[in-house]
Image (cartoon, rainbow, N blue to C red):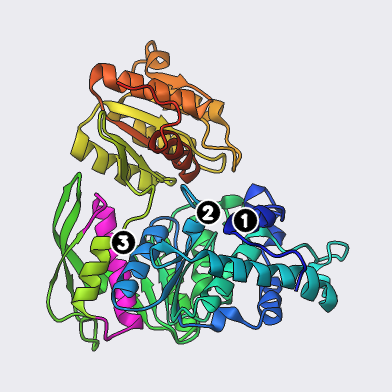
Amino acid sequence: MSKSIFTSSTDFFSWLSGFIDLERGQKPKSFRTDRMETLMDIAGHPERCAPSIHIAGSKGKGSVTGMLAAMLTQAGFRAARYMSPHVTDIRERICLGDSYFSEDVYCAAGNELRHITEELLPAAENPLFNPETEDGAEPTYFELLTLFFFLCARSANCNVMVVETGMGGRLDSTNVLDPLVSVINIIELEHTSFLGNTIQEVAAEKAGIIKQEKPLILAKQSEEVIDIFIKKTKEKNSPLLYLPDIAGLSNVSITPRGTDFILTFKPCGKTSPLFDTSLSLSINVPGKVQAENAALAIAAVKTAFPHINEDAIRGGLKKFNIPGRFEKIANEPPFIIDGAHTQRSLELCIETFCSLYGEGGILVFGCAADKDEKAMAKTACSHFSKIIITTPGTFKASDIEKIYEAFEAKEANKETAHEKTLLIADTKKAVITAMEFARKRNLPILGTGSFYLVSEIRDFVVRGRGIPSP
């Protein structure tokens, strides 16, 4: 064991940040499952310490992961939860249910990880981890973070793990799992430099989490990609539970306090419905999309653990709450933040926002450089009276001038487009400006486009970092 040990999670995460971070611009070849499998072998296979559920998709997978963990916790499981990105605290990525692990668990797992990287890996002399070899490289930040999660789950004696992919699926660091059930949410064109330039290529990467003879719970997909999943499940001899075929939503009611809905499961072929009676359910997050996420999560948890009952499902969903998912962070004026980072998720977010607070509010927007800013602008422009383009944090590259030009170009009145749309690079100044406009005109605010922007806004507003009083 290394002589220098961690005595707090803060010390551990500071140490971990010194490693290469894929999300900061590593090359596509850095995605390597063989390197992760070798790490698991050296660590004694902590990914096998408990049964798991594995979640992928272009949007909504964080909500599905959180809902699964909440329902399993309500049912009495010690559920380890792995998701990304975080909004306020990096420990949000690695939790016990919806709470942080104890500091003892983080420190024990951190010290074990340090021992692996500083002593066991060098002793193994594996060319996969030698940057001087052709295919070698240091372990990436996300690989080590994923291993750390598994070590935490093992250290805390968890009896189930709910694990969200970081990016893609086939080559993702989490894809060392052999889960009870795989879950894939809606697919959109994203991360094209890593996952492919077509939606079919992206879907094929996501389908890489499907395991031999293990069920796949699949959200509604476009006609462009559905055949990819059908083919893959046949290759793997994996039962396919396609959500539109097995479940239906009705009586969806959305209020600022959350979403109520009725979920009814249907028989599929010779298979009985997952529940014989309709479920009347509530979640504390507004939006029909969250009811759809809940349906996907319920189908997954009932497939993985058939004996889980309605009380655990109902109680878990009622307690589900994670930052940055249509979260109200201020009341006067109403200020909503949501990590809608694809065109479809932005469309659904705006639809919910306008249904609750009306048209003509204020939008604070920023997205990463790999997003389709023209499509985003087309979706958003007509719904807001003031739009402020800003920097979505510093974690990912962003071309805010290009975003600003896309939003200006979508304005119907070209002469006043520059008055409606502002470019304020500094996020704090952008938020202050939005708040001032909102208070003068009694208008609601929506901050969206990137989880990294949501994180910046939340930190500034919730922690009171300089927001002027009304």
Element marked by disc 3: helix
Cα separation between marks 1 and 3: 31 Å
Q: Give the quarter of the image for residue 399.
A: top right
* Residue 434 visible in the displayed image: yes
Closer to the N terminus: mark 1 or mark 2? 1
Which span of residues is magenta-colored? 283-308
Q: Which residue is denoted by mark 1 in the rendering?
A: 13
Q: Where is residue 324 in the image (x, y as percent from the top left)?
A: 39, 47
Distance in Å between CA atoms under marks 1 and 2: 8 Å
Residue at the spot 62% in from the left edge and 82% down from the top edge: 45
Residue type pointed to by label 1: Phe
Give the position of the C terminus as an image quadrant: top left
Are dots 2 and 3 in contact, CB under 8 Å?
A: no
**Residue ID for mark 3:** 293
Is 297 contained in the magenta span? yes
Q: Which residue is drawn at 19% across and 39% down?
A: 356
Q: Whole-percent x and y of residue 465? A: 45, 31
Check disc 2 and report the residue beneath it: 90
In depth, the one of 357 and 470 nearer the eye is 470
Q: In this view, does 324 lie above or below 332?
A: below
Between tags 1 and 3, which lies in front?
1
Q: Quadrant of residue 436?
A: top left
Q: Where is residue 164 in the image (x, y as percent from the top left)?
A: 47, 65
Task: Name the residue type under label 2.
Answer: Ile
Image mark for residue 258: none
- Residue type marked 3: Asn
Residue, x 20% and y 44% (percent of image)?
256
Of all residues shown, which one is farthest toward the right? 132
Q: What element carries label 1?
A: helix
Asked if residue 42 lies left or right of residue 407, the reply is right
Residue 311 pos. (x, y %) = 19, 75
Horizontally, residue 448 falls left or right of residue 424, namely: left
